Amino acid sequence: MLKALRAQKGEGKRRRSKAAETGERKRGKSREQRMGIRSVFDAGEMRRELEKRGVDPHKFLPLIWKHVILKWNHHSSSDWDWEKHVPSLPSPAYSLLRSTSPLSSSLHSVFHSNDNLTTKLLIKLHNGDFVEAVIMRYDTRLGKYAGKPRPGGVRATLCISSQVGCKMGCKFCATGTMGFKSSLTSGEIVEQLVHASSFSHIRNVVFMGMGEPLNNYSAVVESIRVMTGLPFQLSLKRITVSTVGIIHAINKLHNDLPGLNLAVSLHAPVQDIRCQIMPAARAFPLQKLMDSLQEYQRNSQQKILIEYIMLDGVNDEEQHAHQLGKLLETFQVVVNLIPFNSIGMLSQFKPTTEQKVSTFQKILRGTYNIRTTIRKQMGQDISGACGQLVVNTPDKSLGNAEPVTDIEDLFI
Ligand code: SF4
Protein backbone atom coordinates (compact mmCIF):
# COMPACT_ATOMS: atom_id res chain seq x y z
CA MET A 1 0.00 0.00 0.00
CA LEU A 2 2.74 2.42 1.02
CA LYS A 3 4.63 1.48 -2.11
CA ALA A 4 1.56 2.31 -4.19
CA LEU A 5 1.18 5.63 -2.42
CA ARG A 6 4.82 6.49 -3.00
CA ALA A 7 4.45 5.63 -6.67
CA GLN A 8 1.40 7.89 -6.88
CA LYS A 9 3.26 10.61 -5.05
CA GLY A 10 6.07 10.41 -7.61
CA GLU A 11 3.49 10.53 -10.37
CA GLY A 12 2.01 13.64 -8.74
CA LYS A 13 5.39 15.35 -8.78
CA ARG A 14 5.94 14.42 -12.43
CA ARG A 15 2.53 15.79 -13.37
CA ARG A 16 3.14 18.95 -11.40
CA SER A 17 6.34 19.90 -13.18
CA LYS A 18 4.85 19.26 -16.62
CA ALA A 19 1.73 21.20 -15.71
CA ALA A 20 3.89 24.09 -14.51
CA GLU A 21 5.82 24.14 -17.80
CA THR A 22 2.59 24.06 -19.78
CA GLY A 23 1.15 26.84 -17.61
CA GLU A 24 4.18 29.02 -18.23
CA ARG A 25 3.97 28.52 -21.98
CA LYS A 26 0.35 29.63 -21.91
CA ARG A 27 0.83 32.59 -19.60
CA GLY A 28 -0.83 35.73 -20.86
CA LYS A 29 -4.00 33.99 -22.03
CA SER A 30 -5.85 32.20 -19.22
CA ARG A 31 -8.08 29.21 -19.80
CA GLU A 32 -11.15 31.18 -18.69
CA GLN A 33 -10.40 33.79 -21.35
CA ARG A 34 -10.09 31.08 -23.98
CA MET A 35 -13.19 29.04 -23.18
CA GLY A 36 -14.91 30.28 -20.03
CA ILE A 37 -14.50 26.95 -18.22
CA ARG A 38 -12.09 26.40 -15.38
CA SER A 39 -12.80 22.73 -14.70
CA VAL A 40 -14.68 20.01 -16.60
CA PHE A 41 -16.19 19.22 -13.19
CA ASP A 42 -17.85 22.66 -13.12
CA ALA A 43 -21.18 21.05 -13.95
CA GLY A 44 -23.25 24.16 -14.67
CA GLU A 45 -20.66 25.66 -17.03
CA MET A 46 -20.09 22.36 -18.81
CA ARG A 47 -23.82 21.75 -19.24
CA ARG A 48 -24.32 25.18 -20.78
CA GLU A 49 -21.34 24.82 -23.13
CA LEU A 50 -22.34 21.32 -24.25
CA GLU A 51 -25.94 22.39 -24.83
CA LYS A 52 -24.75 25.35 -26.89
CA ARG A 53 -23.02 22.84 -29.14
CA GLY A 54 -26.06 20.57 -29.38
CA VAL A 55 -24.57 17.85 -27.14
CA ASP A 56 -26.81 16.27 -24.50
CA PRO A 57 -25.04 16.95 -21.16
CA HIS A 58 -27.12 14.43 -19.21
CA LYS A 59 -25.89 11.64 -21.45
CA PHE A 60 -22.29 12.71 -22.08
CA LEU A 61 -21.10 14.67 -19.04
CA PRO A 62 -21.08 11.68 -16.64
CA LEU A 63 -19.24 9.74 -19.35
CA ILE A 64 -16.56 12.44 -19.64
CA TRP A 65 -16.14 12.51 -15.85
CA LYS A 66 -15.95 8.72 -15.63
CA HIS A 67 -13.10 8.50 -18.13
CA VAL A 68 -11.21 11.39 -16.51
CA ILE A 69 -11.47 9.75 -13.07
CA LEU A 70 -10.32 6.37 -14.42
CA LYS A 71 -7.50 7.55 -16.65
CA TRP A 72 -6.20 10.91 -15.50
CA ASN A 73 -4.00 9.46 -12.76
CA HIS A 74 -1.80 7.82 -15.39
CA HIS A 75 -1.37 10.90 -17.59
CA SER A 76 -0.17 14.48 -17.58
CA SER A 77 -1.86 17.35 -19.40
CA SER A 78 0.78 17.18 -22.15
CA ASP A 79 0.03 13.55 -23.09
CA TRP A 80 -3.72 13.69 -22.51
CA ASP A 81 -5.69 13.08 -25.69
CA TRP A 82 -9.44 13.65 -25.37
CA GLU A 83 -10.33 11.61 -28.50
CA LYS A 84 -8.26 8.67 -27.31
CA HIS A 85 -8.99 8.75 -23.58
CA VAL A 86 -12.68 9.69 -23.74
CA PRO A 87 -13.96 7.84 -26.81
CA SER A 88 -17.41 7.96 -28.42
CA LEU A 89 -18.32 11.60 -27.82
CA PRO A 90 -20.03 13.70 -30.51
CA SER A 91 -17.42 15.79 -32.35
CA PRO A 92 -18.68 19.21 -31.05
CA ALA A 93 -17.86 17.96 -27.53
CA TYR A 94 -14.22 17.45 -28.51
CA SER A 95 -13.98 21.00 -29.86
CA LEU A 96 -14.95 22.19 -26.39
CA LEU A 97 -12.72 19.75 -24.51
CA ARG A 98 -9.61 20.14 -26.64
CA SER A 99 -8.87 23.55 -25.16
CA THR A 100 -8.89 22.37 -21.56
CA SER A 101 -6.98 20.10 -19.26
CA PRO A 102 -8.97 17.26 -17.66
CA LEU A 103 -8.31 18.67 -14.19
CA SER A 104 -7.79 22.34 -13.41
CA SER A 105 -5.94 21.56 -10.16
CA SER A 106 -2.92 19.38 -9.53
CA LEU A 107 -1.74 17.30 -6.65
CA HIS A 108 1.23 19.20 -5.27
CA SER A 109 2.20 17.04 -2.27
CA VAL A 110 0.97 14.08 -0.28
CA PHE A 111 1.60 13.43 3.42
CA HIS A 112 0.55 10.24 5.15
CA SER A 113 0.64 9.17 8.75
CA ASN A 114 2.87 6.32 9.86
CA ASP A 115 -0.12 4.10 10.48
CA ASN A 116 -1.59 5.05 7.08
CA LEU A 117 -4.89 6.09 8.67
CA THR A 118 -4.56 9.69 7.55
CA THR A 119 -3.45 11.14 4.23
CA LYS A 120 -3.23 14.85 3.65
CA LEU A 121 -3.33 16.20 0.09
CA LEU A 122 -1.96 19.61 -0.77
CA ILE A 123 -3.72 20.64 -3.98
CA LYS A 124 -2.59 23.46 -6.22
CA LEU A 125 -5.38 25.39 -7.92
CA HIS A 126 -5.11 26.82 -11.45
CA ASN A 127 -4.32 30.29 -10.04
CA GLY A 128 -1.45 29.04 -7.87
CA ASP A 129 -3.37 29.02 -4.57
CA PHE A 130 -3.37 25.90 -2.44
CA VAL A 131 -6.09 24.02 -0.60
CA GLU A 132 -5.89 20.96 1.59
CA ALA A 133 -8.00 17.84 1.66
CA VAL A 134 -7.61 15.06 4.18
CA ILE A 135 -8.46 11.37 3.85
CA MET A 136 -9.26 9.71 7.18
CA ARG A 137 -9.51 5.95 7.21
CA TYR A 138 -11.46 4.11 9.84
CA ASP A 139 -11.59 0.39 10.42
CA THR A 140 -15.14 -0.41 11.46
CA ARG A 141 -13.97 -3.51 13.31
CA LEU A 142 -12.31 -1.24 15.88
CA GLY A 143 -15.70 0.21 16.82
CA LYS A 144 -18.52 -1.44 18.71
CA TYR A 145 -22.14 -1.74 17.73
CA ALA A 146 -24.63 -3.36 20.13
CA GLY A 147 -21.64 -4.50 22.21
CA LYS A 148 -19.97 -6.34 19.30
CA PRO A 149 -17.30 -5.31 16.79
CA ARG A 150 -18.92 -3.52 13.87
CA PRO A 151 -19.18 -5.58 10.71
CA GLY A 152 -17.43 -4.27 7.59
CA GLY A 153 -13.89 -3.12 6.98
CA VAL A 154 -11.99 0.05 6.27
CA ARG A 155 -14.01 3.14 5.34
CA ALA A 156 -12.54 6.36 4.08
CA THR A 157 -13.87 9.82 4.79
CA LEU A 158 -12.65 12.81 2.82
CA CYS A 159 -12.52 16.22 4.49
CA ILE A 160 -12.63 18.87 1.77
CA SER A 161 -12.22 22.61 1.48
CA SER A 162 -14.75 25.02 -0.01
CA GLN A 163 -12.70 28.24 0.07
CA VAL A 164 -9.11 29.43 0.16
CA GLY A 165 -8.98 30.92 3.65
CA CYS A 166 -12.17 32.05 5.40
CA LYS A 167 -13.99 35.30 6.17
CA MET A 168 -15.42 34.21 9.48
CA GLY A 169 -12.25 34.76 11.51
CA CYS A 170 -12.94 32.31 14.35
CA LYS A 171 -10.20 33.02 16.84
CA PHE A 172 -9.33 29.40 17.63
CA CYS A 173 -9.11 28.35 13.98
CA ALA A 174 -5.95 28.08 11.91
CA THR A 175 -7.81 28.83 8.67
CA GLY A 176 -9.37 31.91 10.26
CA THR A 177 -5.86 33.33 10.73
CA MET A 178 -5.24 33.23 6.96
CA GLY A 179 -8.01 35.66 6.11
CA PHE A 180 -10.12 35.13 2.99
CA LYS A 181 -8.63 34.73 -0.48
CA SER A 182 -11.27 33.20 -2.73
CA SER A 183 -14.15 30.76 -3.06
CA LEU A 184 -13.68 27.54 -4.98
CA THR A 185 -15.81 26.70 -7.99
CA SER A 186 -17.94 23.57 -7.78
CA GLY A 187 -15.44 21.88 -10.10
CA GLU A 188 -12.50 22.70 -7.84
CA ILE A 189 -14.43 21.22 -4.92
CA VAL A 190 -15.23 18.03 -6.87
CA GLU A 191 -11.63 17.73 -8.05
CA GLN A 192 -10.56 17.20 -4.43
CA LEU A 193 -12.67 14.05 -4.49
CA VAL A 194 -11.11 13.03 -7.82
CA HIS A 195 -7.58 13.41 -6.42
CA ALA A 196 -8.48 11.57 -3.22
CA SER A 197 -10.14 8.71 -5.11
CA SER A 198 -6.76 7.70 -6.50
CA PHE A 199 -5.67 6.86 -2.92
CA SER A 200 -8.80 5.40 -1.33
CA HIS A 201 -12.34 4.47 -2.12
CA ILE A 202 -14.11 7.46 -0.56
CA ARG A 203 -17.34 6.63 1.19
CA ASN A 204 -18.04 9.80 3.20
CA VAL A 205 -17.37 13.45 2.44
CA VAL A 206 -17.30 16.17 5.08
CA PHE A 207 -17.10 19.88 4.30
CA MET A 208 -14.90 20.60 7.30
CA GLY A 209 -11.79 21.75 5.49
CA MET A 210 -10.84 25.34 4.76
CA GLY A 211 -13.66 27.85 4.48
CA GLU A 212 -17.27 28.29 5.50
CA PRO A 213 -19.18 26.15 2.99
CA LEU A 214 -22.42 28.10 3.28
CA ASN A 215 -20.57 31.29 2.31
CA ASN A 216 -19.99 29.55 -1.03
CA TYR A 217 -23.50 28.18 -1.19
CA SER A 218 -24.23 27.63 -4.86
CA ALA A 219 -20.84 26.07 -5.64
CA VAL A 220 -21.14 23.74 -2.64
CA VAL A 221 -24.69 22.69 -3.56
CA GLU A 222 -23.69 22.07 -7.17
CA SER A 223 -20.61 20.08 -6.13
CA ILE A 224 -22.71 17.87 -3.85
CA ARG A 225 -25.18 17.24 -6.68
CA VAL A 226 -22.25 16.13 -8.84
CA MET A 227 -20.89 13.87 -6.09
CA THR A 228 -24.25 12.17 -5.63
CA GLY A 229 -24.82 11.65 -9.35
CA LEU A 230 -23.05 9.48 -11.92
CA PRO A 231 -20.27 8.45 -11.86
CA PHE A 232 -19.45 9.19 -8.19
CA GLN A 233 -22.79 8.10 -6.74
CA LEU A 234 -22.06 8.99 -3.13
CA SER A 235 -25.06 8.78 -0.88
CA LEU A 236 -26.34 12.18 0.29
CA LYS A 237 -26.65 10.78 3.78
CA ARG A 238 -22.87 10.24 3.72
CA ILE A 239 -22.13 13.89 3.00
CA THR A 240 -21.90 16.38 5.87
CA VAL A 241 -21.74 20.15 5.59
CA SER A 242 -20.35 21.95 8.61
CA THR A 243 -21.26 25.59 9.20
CA VAL A 244 -20.84 28.24 11.85
CA GLY A 245 -24.55 28.90 11.36
CA ILE A 246 -25.32 31.04 8.29
CA ILE A 247 -29.03 31.25 9.03
CA HIS A 248 -30.40 32.26 5.62
CA ALA A 249 -28.44 29.43 3.97
CA ILE A 250 -29.51 26.81 6.53
CA ASN A 251 -33.10 27.82 5.76
CA LYS A 252 -32.60 26.84 2.09
CA LEU A 253 -30.46 23.76 2.56
CA HIS A 254 -33.12 21.13 3.20
CA ASN A 255 -35.04 22.13 0.05
CA ASP A 256 -31.93 22.09 -2.09
CA LEU A 257 -30.35 18.90 -0.69
CA PRO A 258 -32.90 16.86 1.25
CA GLY A 259 -31.11 14.12 3.21
CA LEU A 260 -27.82 15.99 3.63
CA ASN A 261 -26.19 15.84 7.08
CA LEU A 262 -25.75 19.15 8.84
CA ALA A 263 -23.04 19.90 11.40
CA VAL A 264 -23.04 23.18 13.29
CA SER A 265 -19.92 24.64 14.85
CA LEU A 266 -21.66 26.00 17.92
CA HIS A 267 -18.66 26.22 20.28
CA ALA A 268 -20.50 28.23 22.96
CA PRO A 269 -23.84 27.94 24.74
CA VAL A 270 -24.53 31.69 24.92
CA GLN A 271 -24.28 34.56 22.45
CA ASP A 272 -21.68 36.54 24.42
CA ILE A 273 -19.09 33.77 24.40
CA ARG A 274 -19.87 32.91 20.78
CA CYS A 275 -19.17 36.51 19.72
CA GLN A 276 -16.01 36.54 21.77
CA ILE A 277 -14.50 33.52 19.99
CA MET A 278 -16.40 33.69 16.66
CA PRO A 279 -16.74 37.33 15.56
CA ALA A 280 -19.10 36.39 12.70
CA ALA A 281 -21.64 35.14 15.27
CA ARG A 282 -22.70 38.78 15.81
CA ALA A 283 -24.56 38.57 12.53
CA PHE A 284 -26.29 35.34 13.56
CA PRO A 285 -27.92 35.69 16.99
CA LEU A 286 -27.94 32.39 18.85
CA GLN A 287 -31.70 32.28 19.39
CA LYS A 288 -32.38 32.89 15.69
CA LEU A 289 -29.86 30.19 14.82
CA MET A 290 -31.56 27.71 17.17
CA ASP A 291 -34.94 28.58 15.61
CA SER A 292 -33.59 27.86 12.15
CA LEU A 293 -32.08 24.55 13.35
CA GLN A 294 -35.44 23.64 14.89
CA GLU A 295 -37.05 24.27 11.50
CA TYR A 296 -34.31 22.34 9.68
CA GLN A 297 -34.80 19.36 11.98
CA ARG A 298 -38.57 19.49 11.68
CA ASN A 299 -38.28 19.34 7.89
CA SER A 300 -35.39 16.90 7.60
CA GLN A 301 -36.18 14.61 10.55
CA GLN A 302 -32.43 14.12 10.84
CA LYS A 303 -29.98 14.40 13.70
CA ILE A 304 -27.74 17.45 13.73
CA LEU A 305 -24.08 17.20 14.69
CA ILE A 306 -23.04 19.92 17.14
CA GLU A 307 -19.33 20.68 17.21
CA TYR A 308 -17.98 22.21 20.38
CA ILE A 309 -14.32 23.11 20.77
CA MET A 310 -13.13 22.99 24.37
CA LEU A 311 -11.19 26.14 25.32
CA ASP A 312 -9.73 26.35 28.78
CA GLY A 313 -11.52 28.87 30.98
CA VAL A 314 -13.65 30.15 28.10
CA ASN A 315 -16.47 27.69 27.40
CA ASP A 316 -15.54 24.55 29.34
CA GLU A 317 -16.95 25.08 32.84
CA GLU A 318 -19.74 22.98 34.33
CA GLN A 319 -22.17 25.92 34.02
CA HIS A 320 -21.47 25.97 30.27
CA ALA A 321 -22.28 22.28 30.03
CA HIS A 322 -25.62 22.92 31.74
CA GLN A 323 -26.35 25.91 29.49
CA LEU A 324 -25.53 23.79 26.43
CA GLY A 325 -27.66 20.90 27.72
CA LYS A 326 -30.66 23.21 28.18
CA LEU A 327 -30.14 24.78 24.75
CA LEU A 328 -30.09 21.40 23.03
CA GLU A 329 -32.42 19.23 25.08
CA THR A 330 -35.35 19.57 22.69
CA PHE A 331 -33.21 18.63 19.66
CA GLN A 332 -32.06 15.32 18.22
CA VAL A 333 -28.34 16.01 18.23
CA VAL A 334 -24.97 14.43 18.71
CA VAL A 335 -22.48 16.69 20.45
CA ASN A 336 -18.85 16.25 19.44
CA LEU A 337 -16.47 17.77 21.99
CA ILE A 338 -13.23 18.76 20.30
CA PRO A 339 -10.09 19.16 22.40
CA PHE A 340 -8.39 22.36 21.22
CA ASN A 341 -5.10 21.85 19.44
CA SER A 342 -2.95 24.89 18.83
CA ILE A 343 -0.28 23.10 16.80
CA GLY A 344 0.80 25.21 13.86
CA MET A 345 -0.65 28.50 15.13
CA LEU A 346 -0.02 31.11 17.78
CA SER A 347 -3.06 31.16 19.97
CA GLN A 348 -4.47 32.99 22.94
CA PHE A 349 -6.30 29.80 23.94
CA LYS A 350 -5.22 26.76 25.90
CA PRO A 351 -6.63 23.24 25.71
CA THR A 352 -9.06 22.05 28.37
CA THR A 353 -7.79 19.27 30.62
CA GLU A 354 -8.98 15.73 29.90
CA GLN A 355 -10.66 15.69 33.29
CA LYS A 356 -12.76 18.76 32.46
CA VAL A 357 -13.68 17.43 29.02
CA SER A 358 -14.84 14.22 30.64
CA THR A 359 -16.92 16.11 33.26
CA PHE A 360 -18.50 18.19 30.48
CA GLN A 361 -19.41 15.02 28.62
CA LYS A 362 -20.88 13.40 31.74
CA ILE A 363 -23.17 16.40 32.38
CA LEU A 364 -24.52 16.40 28.82
CA ARG A 365 -25.03 12.65 28.86
CA GLY A 366 -26.17 12.14 32.44
CA THR A 367 -28.30 15.23 33.08
CA TYR A 368 -29.61 15.95 29.59
CA ASN A 369 -29.42 12.54 27.91
CA ILE A 370 -27.55 13.99 24.95
CA ARG A 371 -25.30 11.66 22.99
CA THR A 372 -21.85 13.20 23.41
CA THR A 373 -18.57 12.04 21.93
CA ILE A 374 -15.04 13.32 22.38
CA ARG A 375 -13.05 13.74 19.21
CA LYS A 376 -9.72 11.97 19.44
CA GLN A 377 -6.70 13.69 18.05
CA MET A 378 -5.61 12.42 14.63
CA GLY A 379 -2.00 13.27 13.94
CA GLN A 380 -1.94 17.06 13.96
CA ASP A 381 -5.70 17.24 14.37
CA ILE A 382 -6.03 17.76 10.66
CA SER A 383 -9.70 16.90 10.93
CA GLY A 384 -10.60 19.97 13.01
CA ALA A 385 -14.13 21.28 13.16
CA CYS A 386 -15.37 23.37 10.27
CA GLY A 387 -12.10 24.09 8.59
CA GLN A 388 -9.29 24.10 11.07
CA LEU A 389 -6.94 23.53 8.20
CA VAL A 390 -4.38 26.01 7.09
CA VAL A 391 -2.21 25.56 4.06
CA ASN A 392 1.19 24.45 5.19
CA THR A 393 3.61 21.66 4.55
CA PRO A 394 3.48 19.50 7.64
CA ASP A 395 6.07 16.96 8.70
CA LYS A 396 5.91 13.96 6.41
CA SER A 397 4.91 11.87 9.39
CA LEU A 398 1.65 12.79 11.04
CA GLY A 399 2.20 10.34 13.87
CA ASN A 400 0.05 7.41 14.87
CA ALA A 401 -3.62 8.06 15.27
CA GLU A 402 -5.78 6.52 17.95
CA PRO A 403 -8.98 4.82 16.86
CA VAL A 404 -11.61 7.52 16.39
CA THR A 405 -15.36 7.58 16.12
CA ASP A 406 -16.16 7.65 12.44
CA ILE A 407 -18.44 10.47 11.19
CA GLU A 408 -20.71 7.85 9.66
CA ASP A 409 -21.41 6.36 13.08
CA LEU A 410 -22.30 9.72 14.62
CA PHE A 411 -25.44 10.07 12.52
CA ILE A 412 -26.82 6.59 13.28
S1 SF4 B 1 -13.84 27.54 12.11
FE1 SF4 B 1 -14.73 27.38 10.05
S2 SF4 B 1 -15.90 29.27 9.82
FE2 SF4 B 1 -14.49 29.60 11.54
S3 SF4 B 1 -12.69 30.61 10.61
FE3 SF4 B 1 -12.32 28.40 10.67
S4 SF4 B 1 -12.96 27.67 8.64
FE4 SF4 B 1 -13.88 29.68 8.96
Image (tube, rainbow, N blue to C red):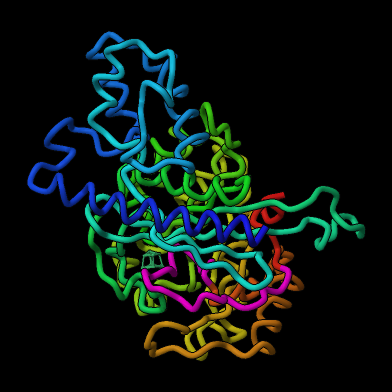
- Note whether 140 is above or below 176 in the view shown: above
Is 399 in front, or is 355? 399
Q: Residue at x 41, y 23 (%)?
A: 84
Q: Residue at x 29, y 49 (%)?
A: 19
Is 193 in front, or is 395? 395
Is 7 in front, or is 352? 7
> Image check: 174 left or right of 300?
left
Residue lying furthest left in this view? 28
Residue lying furthest right in this view? 148
Residue 47 shows in the view: yes
- Note whether 402 is above or below 229 in the view shown: below
Q: Position of residue 278 (x, y in %)?
A: 36, 72
- Note whether 153 is above or below 168 in the view shown: above
Q: Residue at x 25, y 64 (%)?
A: 180
Query: Residue 211's image quarter?
Result: bottom left
Give the quadrant of ligand 1.
bottom left
User: Magenta segment range?
Assistant: 382-403
> Image check: 350 left or right of 138?
left
Residue 330 shows in the view: no
Is 123 in front, or is 305? 123
